[in-house]
Image (cartoon, rainbow, N blue to C red):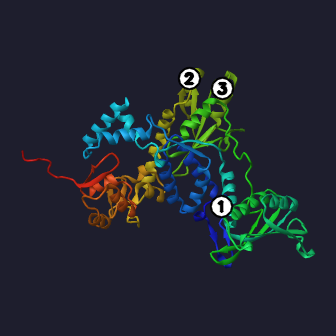
Amino acid sequence: MLTKDLLRVSRAGGGYHPQFAGEDETALAARVLGCYQGHVGEQRGALTEALRELERDSGDFKLVRGLAKLLEREATFEARATLDPRRARRAAFEAGERGVVTEAEREEALATAADSLDATPEAVATSLYADLDDRQVLATIDRAWEPAALVDQYNLSLAQTALFDATEIRVRSSDPRRVVSAVKRLRLLYEVRRLPEDERRRVAATDREVVVTGPDALFRSTRRYGTRFARLLRALAGTREWELRATVDDRGTERELVLTDADVSVPDADPVTEVSYDSGVEADFAARFGSLDLDWELVREPDAVAAGEHVVIPDFAFDYRHGDFRVYFEIMGFWTPEYVEKKLTRLEAVEDVKMLVAVDESLGVGEAVETRDHRAVPYSGSVRVKDVRDALRGYEADLAAEAAAALPDELHPAADVVTIADLAAANGVSERAIEDTPVPEHERVGRTFVRPAVLDELADRVEAGMTLSAAEDILAEFGIDDASAALSRLGYRVAWDGLSGGTVRRRETDTGDGA
C-alpha cells in the first residue's frame, strides 16, 4: 500500500474513483526508475533533490512520490565513512570545545580530532554526519523493475490504499473459490450470496457474490482490518475476471468504489528481466553511461534502420533530451573478418541517420567506418565513455545553436523566480541554449533568475546575525535553493559558528583594519 497522504482519488458524481496511472505515465515511471538507478552510489540527499526536480517537471507530485515510495522499499541505504560517525563527532566536538567561529578554527579542530583518531582531517570531515539520512548512500536496489511493471504495482498499491477505509466489499470473480479461500485465510467476516439470473452475466457468468464486512460492522475501526482488505485485493486481482464494489467511509461520507480487472493487475513475482547484452563490453558501457547525468538518454536496441534491402538494429541509440534528434551507436567487437565485412556493407547502405561506431582497435577498420560517413570511436578492452561523450558534443553544439536561434531575442518568464534548468525545460532547449539569452525583467543570481522585487523583499527579511538555516528557509519560500549565490547578492557572507552550522554576517566592503 501507499501512505494515505499519497492517495489520488476523484469524488466526481459522489463516487470514490482512484486516479490510476495509465500508459502515458509509463515514461514518468521510467524517469523515476532512472533517478534511483542513476543515484546508486550517491547520497540520499542527491536522490531526493533529483526526485523533487522531477516532481516539479511532472506537475503531479503525488504520482512521483507514490512511484518513488515503491522503489524506496526495494532500496538499501548505508552509511559510508572511513571512521565511525559517532566517534568522529565526539572527537571533533571535544577538539572544538572552546568554540569554533572561523573556518581556520574549524580546520584546526578537525586536525586535532584527526590526530586523536589516527586519521586525516578529510576523513574526519566526511565521516562526521555520514550516518544522517540525507548523507546515507544508495547501495543497491534489491528488485529491478521495468517501467510498465512499476505502473502496475503503483495501481495495485493505490487501489489497496483506497480500500483502507472500506466498510463493506462485494466481490464477483471468475474464480469465487479462490476469493473465499483468501477471505478465510485473512480471517475476514463474509457471506456468499447467490445472484439472480439477470445479474449472473455481469462477471464471467458467476452465480455467487462474496460480501465481506469491514471493521465498522463490529463497531470499531482497526488498521489491521484495512490492511487485510488490501491483501484481499491482491488475491482477487490474480483471477482472470473480477469486479469489486466497496462502500468507503470517506471522512464520514459513504461513497462507492468500483474496481475491475481492467483497473488493477498483479505484477509478476519477478517483474524485471535483466536487460540482456550481446557482450560484456556493451553491458559495461551501458552501466557507466547510465550513471552520468547527460543530455542524452541511452536506448537499448532501438528501432531498425533501413540499409538497402536489409535492416540494421544498432546496439544503442542516444536520444537528445531537448529535441527530436537521435544518434545510433554500434559497438564492433572482436568479430570474424567475414562478419566485419558484412557489417561494413550494411553500414554503407545506411542513409539519412547519424551513427557512431565504436571499433575494436584490433579490427583495423576505423578508417573504413569513417569513409562510410559514420563517426568511428576506437577502443581497446572497453569503450571509454569520455570518447563517446566527446563525439556527442559535436552534435550538441549544432543543436544548441539551432535552439538558441529559435528562441526569442528576450525571455519574459511569468514566475518571479525561475532556474535556468526550469526555463530551459519550459522552452524545450538545453541549459546551454538559455544561458546567453537576455531575461531583462529578472536578475541572474547563480543559476537562477530573480525579479528585483523579490530581491528587495529578501533584503528586508534576511538580516545579519540570523542562522544560515533560517536564511535558507526564507530563500526556500521564494523557490531559491542556491543560498550561497543569493546571500552574496544581498551583501552577506556565512561565518561558521561551529562544525554543523553558520551565521549570516554582513560582507565587509573594506577589509583594512587601519593598523
Residue 74 numbered mark, or none: none
Indicate whether 178 appears above or below 18.
above
Q: Nearer the viewer, mark 3 or mark 1?
A: 1
Mark 1 Cα-neighbour bin, 10 Å: few <14, some 14–19, many ≥20: some
Q: Nearer the viewer, mark 1 or mark 2?
A: 1
Q: Nearer the viewer, mark 2 or mark 3?
A: 2
User: 232 and 265: which one is in front?
Assistant: 232
Q: Earlier in the sequence, mark 2 or mark 3?
A: 3
Is the Cβ of the residue at disc 1 closer than 8 Å to that at disc 2? no
Q: Position of residue 330 (x, y in %)?
A: 61, 34
Q: CA distance from mark 2 to mark 3?
A: 13 Å
| Amino acid type of the residue that numbered disc 1 sits on in the rendered structure | Ala
Indicate whether 64 appears above or below 202.
above
Q: Which residue is mark 1?
A: 21
- Secondary structure at badge 2 equals helix
| Amino acid type of the residue that numbered disc 3 sits on in the rendered structure | Val
- Secondary structure at badge 1 equals loop
Q: CA distance from mark 3 to mark 1?
A: 46 Å
| Amino acid type of the residue that numbered disc 2 sits on in the rendered structure | Glu
Residue 475 visible: yes
Q: Which residue is mark 2?
A: 361
Q: Which residue is drawn at the image coordinates 64% and 78% (left, top)?
A: 252
Q: CA distance from mark 1 to mark 2?
A: 47 Å
Mark 3 Cα-neighbour bin, 10 Å: few <14, some 14–19, many ≥20: some
Is the Cβ of the residue at disc 2 closer than 8 Å to that at disc 3? no
